[in-house]
Image (cartoon, rainbow, N blue to C red):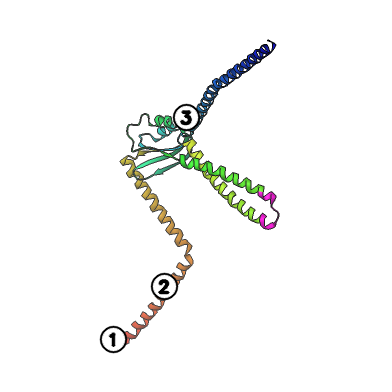
Amino acid sequence: MPVYGFRNILLLGCLIVGCGKIDESTHRTSQQPEAHADAHHVANLDDTHISEETSSTTNPYLIRRGTLVFPTNDRVQSRHRITSAIQQHRGFLADEHQQRNHTSLSETLTIRIEASRFDDLVAAISQGIEQFDVREIDATDVSQEFIDLEARLTTRKDTEQRYRDLLKQANSIDEILKIEAHLDTIRGEIESSESRFRFLQNQIQFSSLTVTFYEPIVTSQHFMRRFSASLARGWFAATEFIIALASIWPVLMLIGLVAWLLQTYLRKERTRYDNRRQPQQAG
């Protein structure tokens, strides 16, 4: 009887241990799908984050330019209206020049303005103008060049830093000279790329607008202006001629002296010839 009791106790203990292992394995098995689901969720979040970053970097880099040419009846008023629009939209004049020909008086203004305000400025200047001789708006996509330059700059700067680290470890003059030669080449490429990169940044950030407006010249005014200009040119030519004569007065005096001597000689020869002929005619 004691033997059977001990055997029953041993079997009961084995059953308890076995059930505990089954529960533990079942619990672990039930946790694996949850862990897999969490990993899959994190992966989806990472993919979403990457796609959002990619989409945010796919915005095109554009250089926008425009040209406006139109006639006006009041050139001064048109200029005032354009400069007021430039100040209102926070632009600035990069260049300006005036031109006069036989038919019109014109002014050309080159305006730089932030790309986000470009369309508003074009609309403000175009307001009230009935007809344009030229109205062109264009955009150049430089995204590929801009991104390539940025990546190339990063790579070249990393290469430059590696060469500088090698320069610190160089043990001979020959190694130092070779590394410095490579550094000079890379530094030149970096400076060239940085110059182009800054230029593109400026062109992307600030758009350019060229505005030309001209005032036709009235026919009567045109004739009088040409007539007065011709008189002025004639007077100028006369004064220049007098000044030129004054500058060569010694030559003129020498020519006058030679002419007087020649005339005197010829007069004397004429007198001698006449005196010789008179006795012959008398005989």
Q: Residue furthest front?
A: 1
Circle 3: residue type:
His
Mark 2 crowd level (few <14, some 14–19, many ≥20, 10 Å Cα)? few
Foreground disc of the pair 3, 1: 3
Left or right: 94 as drawn, with respect to 105: right
Circle 1: residue type:
Gln
Circle 2: residue type:
Ala
- 44 relative to 193, above or below: above
Label pair 3/1, CB-CB below 8 angstroms: no
Residue of label 3: 89
The mark nearer the N terminus, 3 or 1, is 3
* Residue shown at the point (35%, 47%) measured from the top left: 226
Which stretch did the figure color magenta?
Answer: 166-176
Question: Is disc 2 placed on a helix, strand or loop?
Answer: helix
Question: Is disc 3 placed on a helix, strand or loop?
Answer: loop
* Residue shown at the point (54%, 46%) measured from the top left: 193
- 44 relative to 5, above or below: below
